[in-house]
């Protein structure tokens, strides 16, 4: 069993990633931690708790609120993409489960330290909680089994500025700490998710037609993103960056081409704030610190997604 701790700014596709983890036959989701990111912080907490409830697991997975603000920057959210509630403005009821009182940073440190080498971290949000955990307990970094993060871009355009992907852009200072922490990690960049994880009109209609609780939920949650994508990209589509990352965590075969590279993030300039740089040629002569995903299986990802949406084990 893969033991997972998931750090999320729950809105949009974060919910699909959570549901996928909860349906995994080879993994146990032991904790969810919340980072500032997509929408209002307390709303993100409610969204995570409600998603767990939709998956039929209310009360089974503790949810720990964490960083309510990036390390150094003003926090800018993404309601335009995901709706004011981050859930397609669906008006979902309040969740039954309450959040934990322990801070996410302590939850991360305690879980990793309690089982050295066993806990896999999945980051689908800005990296503030992880950076704070590493700063509070630097020795923890050596005890993480692996970190998978959705963030950055590999020689591609950004989605929040021309240069940067949202998770890196919100807290590039935190990303800097994490990238240089020595934790063994895998990067799933925005470009891979756009190339291989974009669901378009016919697939979205197939999902809506499933009529399961999970499929209805996904259709509602992604409603605003679908409008946004039409408006901004002229495409009838919904992106799956977080669930695609989770699929790779649960099934290594979803990542078809992975290469070890040195990766850094810009936290100094304005224009390229949060831009990630992958040293393809090794020209910097720095020791590679990241397994970068260069290719992904669209077929396997969709198989896993549809199994989850049908209420089956993934
Ligand atoms: C990332 O930003 C968030 O809006 C998504 O959930 C994903 O984690 C994509 O840039
Ligand atoms: Ca996210």
Image: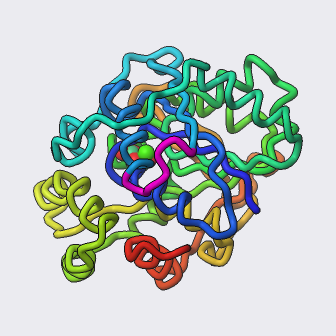
Where residue 37 appears, x then y in whole percent?
A: 40, 33
Query: 237 or 96: which is nearer to us?
Result: 96
Residue at 69 percent across and 22 percent down: it is: 106
Magenta residues, start to end:
54-60
Q: How is the image coloured?
A: rainbow
Residue 162 in sight here: no
Residue at 45 percent across and 62 percent down: it is: 191
Figure disc tally? 0
Query: 92 or 136: which is nearer to us?
Result: 92
Residue 71 in sight here: yes
Left or right: residue 269 versus residue 131 is left
81 drawn magenta: no
Instruction: Indicate whether 12 appears above or below 97.
Output: below
57 drawn magenta: yes
Residue at 13 percent across and 61 percent down: it is: 230
Left or right: residue 135 versus residue 40 is right
Instruction: Indicate whether 259 appears above or below 56.
Output: below
Residue at 74 percent across and 35 percent down: it is: 180
Left or right: residue 38 versus residue 275 is left
Task: Give the quarter of the image for residue 267.
Answer: top right
Where residue 48 appears, x then y in whole percent?
A: 42, 41
Task: Give the quarter of the image for residue 9.
Answer: top left
Q: Quadrant of the C terminus?
A: bottom right
Where residue 307 appears, x then y in whole percent?
A: 46, 78
Left or right: residue 56 versus residue 230 is right
Where residue 164 appears, x then y in whole percent?
A: 42, 43
| Main secondary structure type of the part rendered in magenta | loop
Q: Quadrant of the N terminus?
A: bottom right
Query: 77 or 109: which is nearer to us?
Result: 109
């Amino acid at each position: 069993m893969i033991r997972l701790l998931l750090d999320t700014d729950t809105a949009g596709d974060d919910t699909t990633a959570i549901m996928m983890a909860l349906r995994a036959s080879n993994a146990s989701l032991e904790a969810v931690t919340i980072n500032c990111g997509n929408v209002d912080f307390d709303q993100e907490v409610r969204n995570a708790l409600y998603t767990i409830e939709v998956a039929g697991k209310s009360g089974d997975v503790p949810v720990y609120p964490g960083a309510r603000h990036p390390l150094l920057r003003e926090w800018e959210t993404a309601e335009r993409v995901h709706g004011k509630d981050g859930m397609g403005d669906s008006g979902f009821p309040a969740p039954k489960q309450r959040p934990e009182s322990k801070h996410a940073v302590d939850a991360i440190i305690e879980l990793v330290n309690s089982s050295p080498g066993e806990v896999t971290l999945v980051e689908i949000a800005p990296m503030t909680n992880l950076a704070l955990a590493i700063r509070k307990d630097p020795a923890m970094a050596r005890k993480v089994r692996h970190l998978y993060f959705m963030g950055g871009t590999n020689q591609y355009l950004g989605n929040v500025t021309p240069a940067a992907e949202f998770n890196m852009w919100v807290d590039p200072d935190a990303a800097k700490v994490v990238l240089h922490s020595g934790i063994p990690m895998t990067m799933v960049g925005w470009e891979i998710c756009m190339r291989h994880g974009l669901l378009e009109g016919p697939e979205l209609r197939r999902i809506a037609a499933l009529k399961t609780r999970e499929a209805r939920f996904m259709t509602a949650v992604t409603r605003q993103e679908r409008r946004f994508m039409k408006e901004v990209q002229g495409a009838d589509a919904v992106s799956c960056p977080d669930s695609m990352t989770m699929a790779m965590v649960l099934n290594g075969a979803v990542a078809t081409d992975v290469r070890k590279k040195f990766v850094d993030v810009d936290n100094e300039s304005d224009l390229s704030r949060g831009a990630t740089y992958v040293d393809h040629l090794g020209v910097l002569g720095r020791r590679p610190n990241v397994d970068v995903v260069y290719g992904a299986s669209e077929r396997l990802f969709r198989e896993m997604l549809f199994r989850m949406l049908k209420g089956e084990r993934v």
